[in-house]
Amino acid sequence: MPAPPVSAADERDNDDRDYVNSLARGLTVIRAFNRSRPSMTLSDVAKHTGINRAATRRFLLTLVREGYAETDGRYFRLRPKILELGFSALSSMTFSELAQPVMDELAESIDEMCLAAVLDGDWVVYVNRTVTQRVISVDLDVGSRLPAFCMSSGRVLLAGLSNEALDRWLGELQPVKYTVNTIVSKRKLREQIIQARNQGWSIVDQEYEIGFGSLSVPILGKDGETIAALNVCCPTPRVSPRAMRTEFLPRVQDAADAIRESLPDAYHPARDQLPAGYRRR
C-alpha cells in the first residue's frame, strides 16, 4: 500500500520540530546589541527583541555565565568573547568562500574576469574565478594549471619566496618560449620577479598567448606571507597594459586588501585549498 501523501500541515509540523525556538530567541538577544546600543538594561533588551522580561533575563544571565556578556547589576553589554562565535564560523570557511564575494564585486566594477591562483611547483593553479558576460574572455576554469614563469600571477607568487628559494626554483626551471614576447632568460625573469616583489604587482603582456595580458597582485595573510595571487586577465585589444596599471591596479589592490581583512589570524589556505580532485605533481 503506498504511503499517504504528506500534507502541508504535516510539513509545517516537521519544520517546527526541527526548529529550536530558544536558540533563535537567544540569537535575537545577541543581535539586539550594536554600535548604537552597546549597553542596555534588561527592559531595553526586552523592548528591542519583543521577548518577555523573564525569558530575556534568562538569556542574558546565561550569556553572562558563559562569558559572552557582562553586567554591573543594571546594564548588560557583550564581551569580546562573543567574537569567538563569528571567528569559529569564519575559520571553517575555505579560501574560495572568503575570496569569491570580493572577486565578484571587483569583476563587476571593471567588467573583466578575475581569478585567484596559488603556486604549485612550476605551475600556478587557479582556485577561484568569476563569470564575465564579455563575448571575448579568457578560457580558464578552476583547476587550470599554467606555467608560473610567464604568468603575472606566477611572478607575484614567486616574489613571495625567499631569495634562496627563488634561486633554486629558477635553477630547475626549463622555460618554453610560448610567444615572441615570452621572457626565457632566467636573469631577466629574476629581475621581473624581484620587480614584482618591490612594487607589489606584476603585469605580463602576451607572454603566454598573443592577444591576452594580465595584472596580478599578491593576497597576503595576516602574517604578511603571500598565500595567493589575485589576477585580472583580459584581451589586449580591449585593455592595454597602461590601462591595467592606471585604471585597474588600485581596485585590484583594494580587493586583495579586502580579502586579507576577511581572513582569520594564522589562516594559511593557499596550497590546502586546491580544487577537489586535483592531484599535485
Image (cartoon, helix red, strand yellow):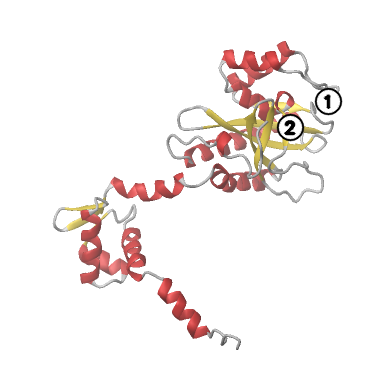
| Quarter of the figure that contains the C terminus | top right
Residue 172 rendering spot, x and y as whole percentages: 70, 16
Amino acid type, mark 1: Tyr
| Quarter of the figure that contains the N terminus | bottom right
In this figure, which residue is indicated by the disc labeled 1?
178
* Crowdedness near tag 1: few (<14), some (14–19) or many (≥20) residues, C-alpha within 10 Å: some
Under tag 1, what secondary structure? Answer: loop
Up-down relation of residue 198 to residue 3 (above or below) = above
Instruction: Name the residue: 70% across, 46% down.
Output: 111
Location of residue 115 by image quarter: top right
In this figure, which residue is indicated by the disc labeled 2?
146
Instruction: Name the residue: 30% across, 47% down.
Output: 81
Residue 10 rendering spot, x and y as whole percentages: 48, 83
Instruction: Name the residue: 58% across, 13% down.
Output: 164
| N-terminal-most mark, 1 or 2 | 2
Residue 33 rendering spot, x and y as whole percentages: 31, 57
- Determine the CA span between mark 1 and mark 2: 12 Å
Depth check, front residue: 136 or 209: 209
Residue 270 rendering spot, x and y as whole percentages: 56, 35
Depth check, front residue: 78 or 221: 221
Depth check, front residue: 10 or 156: 10
Amino acid type, mark 2: Leu
Q: Residue furthest left?
A: 73
In the displayed structure image, the side of residue 15 where residue 40 appears, left or right: left
Instruction: Name the residue: 55% across, 47% down.
Output: 97
Up-down relation of residue 25 to residue 78 (above or below) = below
Numbered mark located on residue 250 in the image: none
